[in-house]
Structure formats: structure tokens, C-alpha cells
Amino acid sequence: MDNDSCISIEANEEATLTLDIKVTDADGNEVVPTVASWALTNREGVVINGRSDVSITPATTMRVNIAGDDLIIEDSTNEREYRLFTVKADRGDVNEPETIETPFWVKNLKNIT
């Protein structure tokens, strides 16, 4: 089974996808990061809609809405397209910043037959 078949999140093109992010320490306890940002890329790592190093207000739960041109279809012949939502959060400890990656699909509504 390839990794693509394990992706369970699917958003409709040009709709809205809301993601809640929680950062944890080494013991699994939720922490408020000192700094957090996100990026959105396609399968080749190309940034979508200029969404690179977008700041997030640090909180226990950080909510990000990905919408409109963030969920645009790049190739109209594709039934769906891969996206990778990546969060980098500095937990304020001596460890490296945490990286959280969430892959998802964007469904091409104009290509439904």
C-alpha cells in the first residue's frame, strides 16, 4: 500500500479546509509554542498561492483556514491533487522546532464525470 492511499483528508477545490494544530512536548503534553508558521506545497514541493512561512498566533490550539486559491487545481485534467500543509513551531525548549506535516487531497469538482 502506498502512502497516498493513507491520506484521509479531502477538500473541495476553492472551498475551505479548517485545520486545528496542537504542539506537544517530549512527554506528550500540549504546549503553547513561542513562534509558529505554516506553508502549503504541492507534491513537487512548489509553494501554493504564496503560502510559505505564514505566521500563526501561538496558542494551545491554533486554527488555520485554507481557502479559495489555496485550494486551486493546478492541472484541470487531474481528478484530485496532493497538497502538504506543514507547520513549524518553536516550543521554547532546547529541542529543535517541531515540524508537523499533514498531507491532503484537493478534489477537482470541475472534473467530476
Image (cartoon, helix red, strand yellow):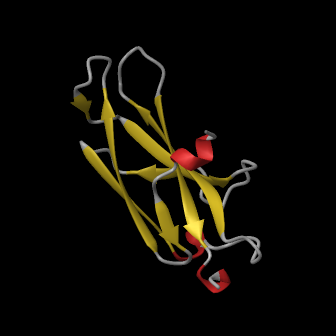
Left or right: 90 as drawn, with respect to 24 = right
Quick check: can you spot residue 49?
Answer: no
- Up the image or down, 57 lies above or below 60; here it is below
Residue 91, how many percent across, how many down? 36, 28
Q: Which residue is rendered at x = 61% and y = 47% of the image?
A: 4
Left or right: 99 as drawn, with respect to 18 = right
Q: Which residue is rendered at x = 56% and y = 60% of the image?
A: 105
Residue 17, how many percent across, how many down? 43, 66
Foreground of the two, 40 or 83: 83
- Up the image or down, 91 lies above or below 17; here it is above
Residue 78, quarter of the rendered image:
bottom right
Q: Quadrant of the N terminus?
A: top right
Q: Quadrant of the C terminus?
A: bottom right
Foreground of the two, 79 or 93: 79
Quick check: can you spot residue 22?
Answer: yes
Residue 29, how many percent across, how many down? 22, 26
- Up the image or down, 2 lies above or below 77; here it is above
- Up the image or down, 113 lies above or below 16; here it is below
Please identify the residue farthest to the top as the structure is shown.
94
Residue 48, how many percent across, how many down? 66, 61
Q: Looking at the image, how many numbered discs can be counted on the residues?
A: 0
